[in-house]
Image (spheres, rainbow, N blue to C red):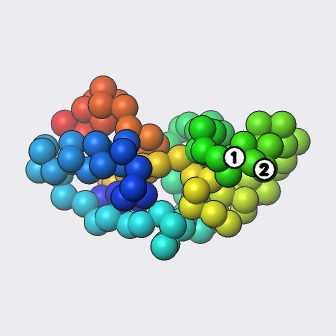
Amino acid sequence: MLFVNYPKCSTCRKAKNWLDEHGIEYESRHIIDDNPSSEELREWWGMSDLPLKRFFNTSGMKYRELKLKDKLPDMSEDEQLDLLATDGMLVKRPILVGDDDVVLVGFKIKEWEEKLL
C-alpha cells in the first residue's frame, strides 16, 4: 500500500499510528517532497468512486488563498487534476492506495476499518 501523507499533519500521524497498530504494511510518501502527479491523481480518483472535490484539502490555507471554493465549479476535471498536481498542500491527506481498487482519502476510522480489516 502507498500511504501519501504530510508528517506534520496530526490526522496523518493518527492514520499512520492506526496502520502500525493494525500491522498493515505500507510505503510512506511525503506529499510535499513527492506530490502526486495529475496522472496518479486521475487513476486514484477513478479507483475511488469519490467526487473529485474530495481530493482537495478544502480546509487548507492554500485552498482558501486561491479562492478555490468559487473557482472549482467552473474548472474542468483536467484543470482540477492539474492544479492538484502543482502543490501537495492542495491535496487532501492522507491518501492510502492499495490493491483491489482501495483508495482512502482523509482518515475516517470507520471507513478504514471497513476497507482494510
Residue 98 at what x, y percent from top left? Answer: 34, 54
Q: Is mark 1 on a helix, strand or loop?
A: helix
Q: Is residue 23 left or right of residue 76?
A: left
Q: Is residue 92 above or below residue 110?
A: below
Q: Is residue 91 visible?
A: yes
Residue found at x 69% / y 46%: 63
* 67 sits to left or right of 12: right
Residue 16: x percent and y percent?
A: 26, 50
- Closer to the camera in the image, 69 or 53: 69
The location of residue 113, given as percent across then percent down, is: 25, 32
Tell whether label 2 touches label 1 (CB within 8 Å): yes
Please tell me whether mark 2 sits on a helix, a strand or a loop. Answer: loop
Tag 2 residue: 66
Residue 72 in sight: no
Q: Which mark is residue 38?
A: none
Q: Which amino acid does label 1 sit on?
A: Tyr
Residue at the location (72% across, 43% down)? Answer: 64
Dividing the picture into quadrants, the one containing residue 54 is: top right
Q: Name the residue under label 1.
A: 63
**Residue drawn 78% across the image and 50% down it:** 66
Crowding near pointer 2: few (<14 within 10 Å), some, many (20+)? few
Crowdedness near tag 1: few (<14), some (14–19) or many (≥20) residues, C-alpha within 10 Å? some
Q: Is residue 29 above or below residue 107?
A: below
Q: Which residue is drawn at 84% across and 43% down?
A: 71
Name the quadrant containing residue 51.
top right
